[in-house]
Amino acid sequence: MKKFNFVVWSNPQPGTEEEYNAWYTNQHLADVLKVPGFVAAQRFKLAQAESALPGRYLAIYEMETDDPEAALAELFRRSGTAEMPLNAALDMNTISTALFAAITDKVAGGATTDLVSTKTSR
């Protein structure tokens, strides 16, 4: 299976941060992980005062699938249904997403790796 990371930047509606975080952490992550191909999830809050990123909150979903487009299509199909209810605290106008394909295995601190140099001939 190929490995991917699906990243989602988002924000709460003004004045709903507590509700947004409770829903996202306690319900939404689990709902997404029920979608075939999604295997892990973690949330982050921006730690810098100012940033040009599209949202203050980031969710990273690890995916293992040979067909990431099908997994994303199923995710989007479920979004906003009884299978994956959305919460009014989520600011739908600020959501940004991106899919990244892994090009290396994970490297842990203290691990040694063999670096391979590749040359492109013209």
Image (tube, rainbow, N blue to C red):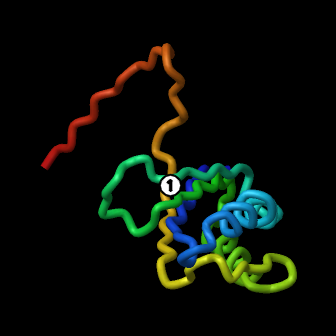
Q: How many marks?
A: 1
User: Seen in the image, is 10 located left or right of residue 51?
Assistant: right
Residue 52 percent across, percent down from the top left: 30, 63
Residue found farthest to the front: 15
Which residue occupies the foreground of this view, 57 or 65?
A: 57
Which residue occupies the foreground of this view, 95 or 64?
A: 95
Please tell me whether mark 1 sits on a helix, a strand or a loop. strand
> Which residue occupies 48% across, 66% down?
98
Residue found farthest to the left: 122
Residue 2 showing in the rendered view: no
> Which residue occupies 73% across, 77% down?
74
Residue 64 percent across, percent down from the top left: 68, 53
Residue 61 percent across, percent down from the top left: 63, 56
Instruction: Classify residue 24 by image quadrant.
Output: bottom right
Instruction: Classify residue 16 by image quadrant.
Output: bottom right
Residue at the disc numbered 1: 101
> Which residue occupies 66% across, 55% down?
63
Residue found farthest to the right: 82
User: Seen in the image, is 92 located left or right of residue 31?
Assistant: left
Residue 113 in the image: above or below residue 9: above
Residue 36 in the image: above or below residue 69: above
Residue 2 in the image: above or below residue 36: above
Residue 106 in the image: above or below residue 6: above
User: Which amino acid lies under the numbered mark 1 shown in the image of this protein?
Assistant: Ala
Residue 69 showing in the rendered view: yes
User: Seen in the image, is 102 located left or right of residue 85?
Assistant: left
Which residue occupies the foreground of this view, 31 or 112?
A: 31
Dot 1, crowdedness within 10 Å: few (<14), some or many (≥20)? few
